[in-house]
Image (tube, grey):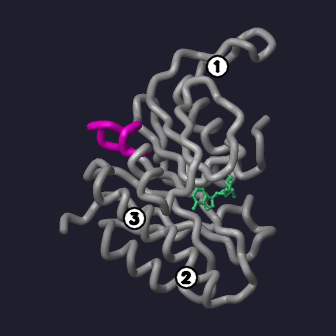
Amino acid sequence: GFRSRAAYKLKEIDETLRLIHPGQVVVDLGAAPGAWSQYVRRKFAPKDVGAGGAAVGELNGAIIALDLLEFEPIEGVVFIQGDFREEAVLAQLQHAVGDRLVDVVISDMAPNLSGIESSDAARIEHLVELAVDFCQHHLKPQGALVCKVFHGSGYSQLAELFKSSFRVVKPIKPKASRDKSAETFLVGMGLKSR
Ligand code: SAM
C-alpha cells in the first residue's frame, strides 16, 4: 500500500501520460506524507520484492522531496523540510538538485485554505507560479510539470501561465480525485524557450 490515497492520482496521471521512467531526476513538491514519492520510488526499482517488504530494489533515478511538514524517511529519497516560498528553502532544493536537470517536477502542494476565495486563489496561484519558475530554471527542455490546481477563480490564469511556459498542456482530473470536486491537475510538457 501507499501512505496516502494521493498515490492513485499520480498513478492515473502517469498511466495516461507516461511521465515517470527509471533513471530520471524527479522533484516532489508538497511531498508529505510521501505517497507520490513512494510511487516514483517503486517505478525506479520495479523488482522491489524483498522478503517481508524489508529489502528495496536498487534505486535507478533520483527523488528529491520537499514539504513544510515532517516526512517519514523513504530509502533513496532526499527530503528537505521547509516552505517552498522561502529563498533559503529554495536554495536547499537547488543545492540538492545540483547541476543536474530535472526530468519531472510533481507538485501536490496545497495551502491551508482560509475560505476567502480571493485570498485562497492568490495563495494557490503563488505556489503554482513558483513551481513553474523552478521548472524554467531546472527542468530539462523535454521535461514535465504535474501540478495540483483548483477549479474556480484563478484557474484560467494558471492554465494560461502553463500555456505560455510549456509546449503541450494537458488538464487532467484523475478519477481518484473525484471526491474533492475543485481539485484538478495541469500537466505541462516541454518547456517553451523564452
Ligand atoms: N502528494 C502527497 C502524498 O502523496 O503524500 C500529499 C500532499 S498534501 C495533499 C499537500 C502538501 O503540501 C502538505 O503536506 C503541505 O504541507 C504541503 N505544502 C503546502 N504548502 C507548502 C509550501 N509552501 N511549501 C512546502 N510544502 C507545502
- On the image, the x and y values in percent for residue 157 come to 45, 84
Q: Amino acid at mark 3?
A: Val
Badge 3 crowding class, 10 Å Cα cut-off, few under 14, some 14 to 19, many 20 or more, is many
Residue at mark 3: 132
Residue 96 circle label = none
| Distance (Cα) linking label 1 and label 3 | 32 Å
Residue at x 62%, y 48% (from the top left corner): 31
Q: Quadrant of the C terminus?
A: bottom left
Is disc 3 placed on a helix, strand or loop? Answer: helix
Q: In this rendering, is residue 65 above or below 164?
A: above
Residue at mark 2: 122
Residue at x 66%, y 62% (from the top left corner): 174
- On the image, the x and y values in percent for residue 185 come to 57, 66
Q: Amino acid at mark 1?
A: Asp
* Membership of 76 in magenta stretch: no
Q: Is residue 51 left or right of residue 165?
A: right
Residue at mark 1: 48
Residue at x 45%, y 78% (from the top left corner): 159
| Distance (Cα) linking label 1 and label 2 | 41 Å
**Which is more foreground, mark 1 or mark 3?**
3
- Magenta segment boundaries in residue numbering: 93-103
Q: Is residue 138 left or right of residue 159?
A: left
Q: Is residue 30 left or right of residue 176?
A: left
| Distance (Cα) linking label 2 and label 3 | 15 Å
- On the image, the x and y values in percent for residue 104 come to 43, 47
